Amino acid sequence: MNNLSGRKWWLANQGRYPNSRNIDDLEPDFKKNVVEFIAVLKNGGAKISVASTRRNAIRAYLMHYSWRIANENFDPENVPSMKGVNIVWDHGDEKSSRIAAREMVDLFGIAFRPSLTSNHIKGSAIDMDIKWTGTLFLGPLRCGISEIDEPRNGATNRELHKVGEQFGVGKLLKDPPHWSFNGR
C-alpha cells in the first residue's frame, strides 16, 4: 500500500500540510503582542529565529499520532481517521507500525508530545529562539526590568519570561522555543 505511514508517506505528503513561520499568520491580537515583544528584544540587541507560528490541524494530527505510536505504545489500529488524510497507521504488525511512526517523528523533528488542540493551530503560539551576547538593554518597562544578562537565551531566562508576560507572550517552560498567549 502506498498510503502506509512512515518515511515514504511523509516525503510524499507532508508538504500538503505546512506549518507557517510567518508572524503575519498569527491571530491578530497575539500577533500585535508578538510584534511589540520582538521589537523591544531586537532593539535591545537580541537575535530572534522563528521556527513555527500557525500549525495546520492535519499536521498536528499527524505529529500527535506518530508520536503516540512511536513513544507511548498507542495501538495504531485505534488511531481515529481524519478527513483529508489518506494514511494507514497499522502496518499489520506492531514492530513495523512503530518503526514507521518513529520515522515520521524523526522527520517532523518532534521533541515533545504534540497536542491536538495546540495554541499553534489557533495562531496563538510561536516557537522562537531568542539569544543575545553581553547585556540585553530593554529600556524601562512596566515590569521593572530594563536590562537582562545571563542566561542569554529565551528558553531559560526567567527575567525575559517576565518581560514576555508584560507583552501578553507567555513562556511554556518545558518546551524551550514555545511562547503563547497563555503560556501553554
Image: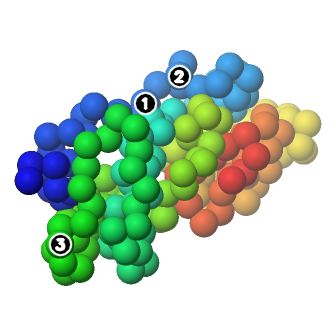
Kind of residue indicated by mark 1: Ser
Q: Residue at x 73, y 60 (%)?
A: 158
Classify residue 126 by image quadrant: top right
* 1 and 2 marks in contact (CB < 8 Å): yes
Residue 161 image position (x, y, % from top left): 73, 52
Classify residue 77 by image quadrant: bottom left
| 1 or 3: tag closer to the N-terminus | 1
Is residue 134 visible in the rendered structure shown here? no
- Residue that label 2 marks: 25
Real-space Cα separation, disc 1 to disc 2, in angstroms: 7 Å
Picture layout, residue 8 above or below residue 125: below
| 3 or 2: tag closer to the N-terminus | 2
- Residue that label 3 marks: 92
Decide: few, some or many residues near mark 2? Use Cα within 10 Å; few <14, some 14-19, many ≥20.
Answer: some
Residue 100 image position (x, y, % from top left): 20, 66
Q: Secondary structure at mark 3?
A: loop
| 1 or 2: tag closer to the N-terminus | 1
Residue 177 appears left or right of 104: right
Kind of residue indicated by mark 2: Asp
- Residue that label 1 marks: 20
Residue 105 image position (x, y, % from top left): 30, 61
